[in-house]
Amino acid sequence: MRITTKPNLLVVVNQWPEPTSTAAGQHLIQVLESLVPVVNSIVIGHTADKTDRSYVFDSNAITSRRIFINDSEFDSFLIDFAPQIVLFDRFNLEEQFGWRVSECCPATMRILNTEDLHGLRAAREEALINNMDWRDCVLSNPTLLRELASLYRSDLTLVISEFEIDFLKSLGVPSRLICYVPFGLETANLNASRNLKTFKERKDLIFIGNFLHKPNVDAINFFVDNLWPGIRSVLSDVQCHIYGAYGSKLNQPNSIKDIIWHGAIDSTEAVLNQSKVNLVPLRFGAGLKGKVLEAMFHGTPSVISEIGAEGVFGTIKSEPLKASNWDDFVDKVILLYRDEKQWKLAQEIGFEVVRTRFDKSVVFQDFIEHMSQVYDNLESHRKLNVIGAMLQRNEHQSTKYMAKWIEEKNR
């Protein structure tokens, strides 16, 4: 940053980041750790209690505070801490706390972190249920409309996927309000000395996902019911290993032959390194899929649905990994599992994707520079955002007085 005095940063979250549970947790940690060198201190205000999966930050600059919705004590905290930047982790928290920040700290820069566009994901789920094209219902989706309002009220919105950047621009959202911040990976570690297992040393299929996340629940149920029988009829000696936190939320089909449920794991490196093909059969969702990039980094080729592949490849050839339909998904799993040449080609494509598109040093340097530019010119930046000013004036009033009513009622 070009700022002479380092700012204080307040991060408003619901759940404290859980990197072993969700890719979103991993991404938020990356964002915060990239900010440590350029801010004075970071306080993470969390509305939910920590769990045994909550991440422990190494930096002493990052501390925590329990906060509560519909509670004016948050106003007192804002005045005492006096943050120059506030980051809201998801739009619903901007709805709850954004008006308080605007009133108590009007000159404070407000950043919205989406992780993925929840409205896009919700519209796709609705379309799947009703056998529609998601484009026919997305603009009427109430979650998307709330999310867009939150975006306009914010000074900058972090978007994880190029697909979502293009989607927002197609709706008329100005580029100056959007900052592309995907996952970042340590590309210096993409070398032959990592002792990655070879094609012949690997076996079986793998699926990784947090099962509090509805797209993952749908994906694995759909895979087991509709895709696994076709794969199993050809690859008769193959098992499918399923890993992920909160698997108890599923009705696990333990009776299905060679579907093995393992639950949560702290690190996916070992299980990816021993697996031959990673499965990403998502039927709805949004954002950038951490499970795809993680598998690529560890040299495990994936077979990916079109939604799962969004934002991953750019102009890089995706055909060996991305399935055009569900029959093609089954065919690609079988081909990659049996054909060493195709498997190595898919592995090399994965390395190229990680190396050229998700280099951690580049990703977060670009983010810091973009954020710095907005911070240093915040007043003139806001003058261009007429829609945001209008929403600040009108829409937040209803949220504000509802919160005050609830607080008074709870006394």
Image (cartoon, rainbow, N blue to C red):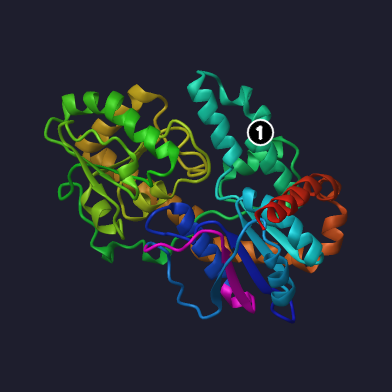
Left or right for 300, reference 391: left
Rendered location of residue 388, percent (x, y): 81, 48
State the residue in front, 336 or 242: 242
Out of 326 and 198, give the one closest to the viewer: 326
Could one spot residue 222 in this view of the protein?
yes
Range of residues picked out in magenta: 36-52
Residue 301 in view here: no
Rendered view: 17 above or below 343: below
Residue 154 x/y as whole percent: 73, 54
Which residue extends farthest left? 237
Q: Residue furthest top?
A: 131
Q: Residue at x 51, y 30 (%)?
A: 125
- If the image is split into quadrants, where does the N terminus sit? bottom right
Determine the residue positioned at 28% across, 62% down: 192
Which residue is at a point 34% across and 50% down the rendered structure image? Answer: 245
Residue 392 image point, x, y percent: 81, 50
Q: Residue at x 58, y 45 (%)?
A: 162
Asked if 255 appears above or below 84 in the picture, the reply is above
Residue 57 falls left or right of residue 104:
left
Residue at numbered disc 1: 142
Quadrant in the picture for residue 233: top left
Which quadrant is the C terminus positioned in?
bottom right
Disc 1 on helix, strand or loop?
Answer: helix
Residue 38 magenta-highlighted? yes
Residue 13 appears left or right of 220: right
Dot 1 amino acid type: Pro
Image position of 46 with respect to 211: above or below:
below
